[in-house]
Amino acid sequence: MAMSLAEIRYLINRLTGLARRSLASLRTRGWRATWQRIRVHTQRGGGAPPPPPRRHTQNTNKKINVKISHNNEHIKNY
């Protein structure tokens, strides 16, 4: 199966980006931490577990005050 020129260009861009990010990771983290990240991200299941859900507290005491001016004319409060 022949690859089109666009597919070849895409793969070259993808591989050069991967190489650039790998070298940056090696410079900043070192080879052990980089290898650990590679192992985590290539495992089946997608890597790190999702973060726990956030708890939203409802505070009805807050008042929102938005002031809109148009061409420095009168100010409207909403």
Image (cartoon, rainbow, N blue to C red):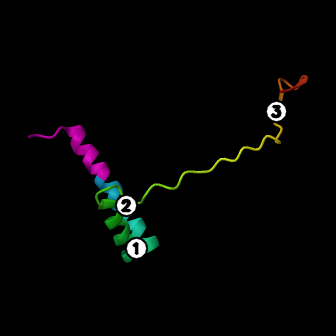
Residue range in magenta is 1-14
Quadrant containing the N terminus is top left
Q: Are marks 1 and 3 in contact (CB under 8 Å)?
A: no
Residue 44 covered by magenta stretch: no
Report the magenta stretch's main SS: helix
Q: Given the image, on which type of amino acid does mark 2 rest? A: Arg
Q: Given the image, on which type of amino acid does mark 1 rest? A: Ala
Foreground residue among 28 and 36: 36
**Residue that label 1 marks:** 33
Q: What x and y, as percent, mark residue 44?
A: 28, 58
Q: Which numbered disc, 3 or 2, marks the residue that appears first in the sequence?
A: 2
Q: What x and y, as percent, mark residue 52?
A: 52, 55
The disc at residue 66 is 3
Nearest to the eye among marks 3 and 2: give it.
Answer: 3
**Residue that label 2 marks:** 20
Badge 1 marks a residue whose secondary structure is helix
Q: Are marks 1 and 2 in contact (CB under 8 Å)?
A: no
Residue shown at 32% from the left, 67% from the top: 39
Rate crowding at label 1 as few (under 14), some (14 to 19) or many (20 or more) other CA atoms within 10 Å. Answer: few
Foreground residue among 49 and 20: 49
Residue shown at 18% from the left, 37% from the top: 4
Q: Given the image, on which type of amino acid does mark 3 rest? A: Val
